[in-house]
Amino acid sequence: MSPTNINLLSGQERSHWIRLRTLILLRWVAIVGQITAITVAQRLYNLQLELVLGYIAIGISVLGNLIAIILFPQNKRLSEFENFLMVLFDLLQLNFLLYLTGGLNNPFALLVLGPVTISASMMRLRSTLIIGATAIILVTLLAEFHLPLRTSQGFMLRVPDIFVFGNWTAIVIAVLFIGAYSYRISAEIRSMSDALAATQMALSREQKLTDLGGVVAAAAHELGTPLATIKLASAELIDELDDRPDLKEDAALIREQADRCRDILRSMGRAGKDDLHLRQAPLSTVINEAAEPHMYRGKTVLFEEGPAKDGNPLHPTILRQPEIIHGLRNLVQNAVDFARSTVWIDATWNDDTITLIISDDGRGYPSHLLGRIGDPFVRRRRSDSDRKQRPEYEGMGLGLFIAKTLLERSGAQLSFTNGTDPNQNIMRDPERRGAVVRVKWPRSKIDAITGENAVPIGENKRIEI
């Protein structure tokens, strides 16, 4: 998947997906709650409030909503900056109402967490930090500067200073914790969503290539007869035009181009999938097809296969699925990218399982990332040699995530380790000191001959002459 496509999927652009209508609806809910709170406090509890200033603040929110509804369509998507301004306005308006109604003596002061949570869920880190810092500064000012709450008899309602300090501490901690928590969870959800979208795109591309191979194979089959006829007719013309060298040369050219068309179709259709027989393939064939794009990149790729000690010596025939091919191809690509000189691909099988081990002689996985391999968008600081070796890669997480997801979809279990790990017993060859990936399928999941996934054998079409 190209970096451009990844950027298009980037979660950092998701703030542009929020509809103006959603924030307008949330603001209406806040407006109704504010009016209700002021009305109940004034009429039911006879508190003396600055009603004029309070209703002015609420009226500005109402006016802002009405202007937004009139000027903009309902499906308008807000930019990052527009979202930031909307949330910042709501935060300032709420704190102004709290200033008019007792500051941190008002139990509704905890509503300051609302704008912070919204910003952390949908905005970039910089915008979230500004909103969070603004909330902390305003709450700190409210602890000292606010209009007191007074009853109808003129008594001032306030909690002890120790409780005001406790409220301030609780709100500040909640702003920091809930903001960080919401941002982290949202970032992980965005990363997983982006990675799954990238996986789906990779699988779709592999499926299209598979279908294209079938079309090419069918075209090669259908064009075989007319090309053979052209070749035969041109050969006869060559024999009959010995006395016409100019025409004989043209006939030879026709035959040459017919041969060229045949060779092109044969090379394009060598992986054709139009026959039911070719929906299945020997295990070695599938492995070679997956590794083929990386066979000639300056590294030696060695294949070894055979039954396990208790296994059936008969070579297994497996499903030729795009998930398997693309997943294995990503694993081989990763091994070739980081190997010093050699990559080993070992396949073993028995009556119950099929196991594939891909290892290399490179530096292996960073030890501190071993537990996170397979998570999307695992980042690491790259050296200059890494940048030269893999200039198109920003990290090592997405490719392995795609491979892991696709192969697990086919029923495989994957494990990642290093050849230098003394606790692993997957490889005992000291040369294979780099990364080691073990892919293990239950045989029933991918066996194309027996079991529930067996590929039916269709009838060959009769050739009509």
Image (tube, grey):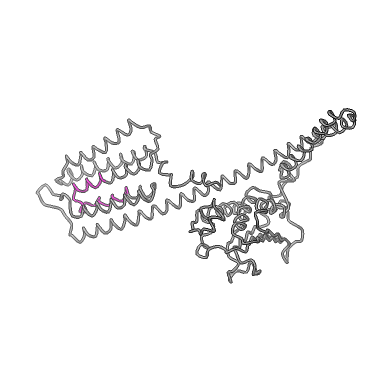
108 in the magenta segment: yes
Residue 204 on image: x %, y %: 59, 43
Q: Quadrant of the C terminus?
A: top right
Relative vertical location of residue 433 with respect to residue 280 in this rendering, above or below: below
Q: Quadrant of residue 256?
A: top right
Residue 447 on image: x %, y %: 70, 53
Front position in the image: 187 or 341: 341
- Please give left or right for residue 5 compared with residue 153 in the image: right
Residue 242 on image: x %, y %: 90, 30
- Please give left or right for residue 458 compared with residue 408 in the image: right
- Residue at the extreme left of the image, as rendered: 153
Taking the spot 47% from the left edge, 51% from the top edge, the residue there is 191
Front position in the image: 243 or 445: 243
Which secondary structure type mostly characterizes the magenta part of the structure? helix
**Which residues lie in the magenta part?**
92-115
The number of numbered badges drawn on the structure is 0
Relative vertical location of residue 22 with respect to residue 150 in this rendering, above or below: above
Front position in the image: 287 or 29: 287
323 in the magenta segment: no
Residue 2 on image: x %, y %: 54, 46
